[in-house]
Image (cartoon, helix red, strand yellow):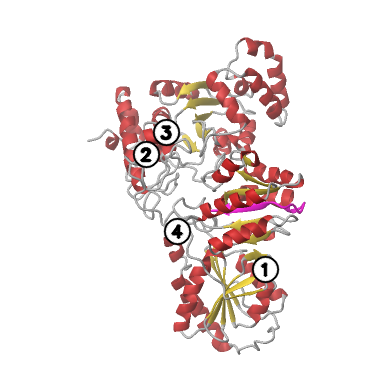
């Protein structure tokens, strides 16, 4: 029996003799390498926190002591030590989530996998404990990458204001988020690692602390007054302790004895304390340690010995099509610059960055700053392309609205992983942008259906210099080209299954394939249809209401929540044009979708050819027999009483 299999709870872990812990750590790493290379998942981050997680669960009594994992992709070891050792369906339907999950375990508290939030959660939990008379410590585990996010510093500012609340902040410092962590904070942590760099530290402190409300200026004054002492013997805990936070470290994050000692001291401190742990991402797996790009941050199924993919590539990815086209645009347009938030490789900017390093800006996990910095670049005469995952643009909505759109600035946002992403679960599905961005005045939004359209619409987007533009596309492999038979206004007609079709199917982006399949299935049911792709889905093209007037039913299909998305906007446009044709909206249910393969979710939500056909046929059988066929030469005027059903 392995040592790992005997640990089914933190109590079992605490019962182990300290001498057995190195063996347990080795078994955990072997398990992770074997399991995660089979299923795919976040391998490098978890290999780096083995000893740290063991120490946390030996010193703290979860779930009574609340442990919050920032982002949560590094929680696999935590899962193993809290009774979840079946990784055979990791990130798949019916298997373990790739992030903390309340449905799985009482030990999982926060499952929001957007970065830089853990300290705010912990601040609130510590306040709740204080008000309820509890003295249990709260633990927040946050990476150095997540500390580049402004929300983390807002939380630190508040945490430092109450020195009698037990709150342990564990900084997992591996110098990386996805790739190497960048920015002033990263440089400061590097200084702490080496206990050198006083002048850089003081300069950074002046810039950062003087902008920090409540405590910033007094702290800087204290630091500046201590200049001679710092120069004589610079102590790395200076900034944190003057902020009101006890500092322990730097600690070797792979030394179990040192970790337990530091965490035990932190637990007994009675106030906010930072434990600064130095870890190695990918620790114990040489291919990961030697991977300079991202230390095997996330892998698809691979052979653990050769590191070659288990399955051959299915084709070209949407991300790579975008990356190649932006590289071509950049060669032609010296005013085009690229911005991302700690995701240079995942969003396809690596080639552009290599060719134009001076025109590429990775701002760290700081989406709000990325957008407003882009506004500044646009004001300065450049055209920024901000590439992020669709779900992460949610964090910068106010900046899109007030800093870019209000000023009518030409900034292009490229949203990777839009629609259903699947395996990463609720917080990674990019199913909100088509609704959220509808309210932004002047913004134009494109949803390419294939690689050719992505290339074309990216170029169209960067030509706009008086408004924000958005280009969105999903995760995965690009399908075959979907040619148009005609263009009416800006709308591509993809298919007509009769001379005078009854149903207008409006397909948003990659839903074109499902709509085309549905049209052919509907023909077998006796219903004729026109399939169109609006290309630019915001604003609604004026050609669409006129097209709708020549049909008896409009069905929109989008991989976004049904509330407030493209379908809703089209229904409004028909009403505004006095086109009395019923509209039915097909899309994702307005709920948090669990982890599963993208295809499984699309099938379950009716966004496949079969699903669209079945729902459309049901609408048609209910609506069409009771309505006369309108004159196809003229719009059918009157109030639209049947919309967004």
**Above or below for 12 versus 17:** below
Q: Circle 3 sits in a helix, a strand or a loop, which is it?
A: loop
Numbered mark located on residue 82 in the image: 2
Q: Nearer the viewer, mark 2 or mark 3?
A: 3
Q: Circle 2 sits in a helix, a strand or a loop, which is it?
A: loop
Position of 235 with respect to 598 (left or right) is right
Which residue shows up at 55% across the image and 58% down it? 473
Position of 25 with respect to 566 (left or right) is left
CB of mark 4 within 8 Å of CB of mark 2?
A: no
Is residue 32 or residue 464 the one in the foreground? 464
Give the x, y percent position of residue 324. 55, 51
Question: In the rendered image, which quarter is residue 448 located in?
Answer: bottom right
Residue of label 1: 540
Numbered mark located on residue 389 in the image: none
Q: Alpha-carbon neighbours of circle 1 within 10 Å: few (<14), some, or many (≥20)?
A: many
Is residue 590 or residue 181 the one in the foreground? 181
Q: Earlier in the sequence, mark 3 or mark 4?
A: 3
Which residue shows up at 66% across the image and 19% down it? 199
Q: Is residue 485 visible?
A: yes
Q: Alpha-carbon neighbours of circle 2 within 10 Å: few (<14), some, or many (≥20)?
A: many
CB of mark 2 within 8 Å of CB of mark 3?
A: no
Q: Nearer the viewer, mark 3 or mark 4?
A: 3
Give the x, y percent position of residue 54. 38, 30
Numbered mark located on residue 598 in the image: 4
Q: Earlier in the sequence, mark 2 or mark 3?
A: 2
Q: Circle 4 sits in a helix, a strand or a loop, which is it?
A: helix
Numbered mark located on residue 290 in the image: 3
């Amino acid at each position: 029996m392995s040592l790992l299999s005997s640990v089914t709870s933190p109590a079992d872990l605490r019962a182990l003799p300290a001498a057995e812990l190195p063996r347990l750590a080795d078994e955990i790493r072997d398990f992770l390498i074997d399991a995660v290379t089979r299923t795919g998942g976040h391998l490098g981050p978890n290999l780096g926190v083995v000893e740290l997680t063991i120490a946390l669960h030996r010193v703290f009594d979860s779930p009574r002591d609340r442990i919050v994992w920032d982002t949560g992709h590094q929680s696999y070891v935590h899962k193993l030590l809290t009774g979840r050792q079946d990784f055979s369906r990791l990130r798949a339907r019916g298997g373990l989530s790739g992030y903390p999950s309340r449905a799985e375990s009482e030990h999982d508290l926060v499952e929001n996998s957007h970065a830089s939030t853990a300290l705010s959660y912990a601040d609130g939990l510590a306040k709740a404990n204080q008000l309820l008379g509890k003295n249990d410590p709260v633990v927040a585990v946050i990476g150095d990458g997540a500390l580049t996010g402004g929300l983390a510093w807002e939380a630190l500012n508040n945490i430092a204001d109450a020195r009698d609340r037990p709150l342990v902040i564990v900084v997992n410092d591996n110098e990386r988020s996805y790739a190497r962590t960048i920015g002033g904070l990263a440089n400061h942590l590097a200084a702490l690692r080496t206990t050198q760099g006083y002048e850089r530290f003081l300069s950074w402190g002046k810039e950062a602390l003087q902008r920090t409300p409540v405590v910033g200026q007094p702290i800087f004054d204290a630091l500046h007054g201590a200049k001679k002492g710092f120069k004589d013997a610079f102590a790395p805990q200076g900034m944190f302790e003057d902020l009101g936070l006890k500092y322990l470290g730097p600690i070797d994050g792979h030394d179990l004895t040192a970790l337990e000692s530091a965490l035990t001291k932190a637990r007994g401190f009675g106030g906010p304390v930072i434990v600064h742990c130095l870890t190695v991402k990918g620790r114990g797996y040489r291919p990961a340690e030697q991977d300079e790009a991202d230390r095997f941050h996330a892998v698809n199924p691979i052979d653990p010995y050769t590191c070659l993919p288990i399955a051959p590539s299915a084709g070209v990815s949407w991300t790579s099509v975008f990356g190649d086209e932006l590289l071509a645009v950049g060669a032609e347009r010296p005013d085009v610059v690229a911005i991302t938030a700690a995701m240079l490789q995942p969003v396809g900017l690596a080639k552009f960055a290599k060719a134009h390093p001076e025109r590429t800006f990775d701002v760290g996990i700081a989406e709000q700053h990325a957008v407003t910095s882009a506004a500044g670049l646009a004001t300065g005469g450049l055209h920024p392309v901000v590439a992020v995952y669709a779900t992460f643009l949610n964090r910068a909505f106010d900046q899109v609205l007030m800093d870019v759109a209000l000023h009518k600035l030409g900034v292009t946002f490229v949203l990777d992983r839009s629609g259903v992403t699947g395996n990463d679960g609720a917080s990674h599905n990019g199913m909100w942008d088509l609704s959220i961005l509808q309210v932004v005045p002047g913004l134009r939004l494109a949803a390419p259906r294939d690689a050719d359209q992505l290339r074309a619409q990216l170029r169209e987007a960067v030509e706009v210099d008086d408004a924000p533009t958005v280009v969105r596309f999903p995760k995965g492999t690009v399908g075959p080209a979907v040619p148009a038979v005609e263009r009416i206004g800006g709308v591509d007609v993809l298919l007509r299954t009769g001379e005078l079709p009854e149903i207008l199917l409006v397909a948003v982006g990659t839903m074109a394939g499902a709509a085309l399949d549905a049209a052919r299935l509907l023909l077998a049911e006796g219903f004729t249809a026109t399939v169109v792709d609006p290309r630019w889905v915001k604003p609604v093209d004026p050609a669409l209401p006129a097209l709708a007037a020549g049909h008896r039913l409009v069905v929109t299909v989008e991989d976004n929540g049904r509330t407030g998305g493209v379908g809703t906007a089209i229904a409004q446009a028909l009403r505004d044009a006095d086109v009395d044709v019923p509209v039915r909206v097909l899309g994702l249910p307005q709920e948090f979708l669990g982890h599963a393969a993208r295809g499984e979710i699309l099938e379950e939500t009716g966004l496949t050819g079969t699903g669209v056909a079945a729902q459309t046929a049901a609408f048609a059988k209910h609506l069409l027999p009771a309505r006369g066929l309108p004159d196809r030469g003229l719009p059918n005027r009157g109030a639209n009483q049947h919309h967004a059903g």
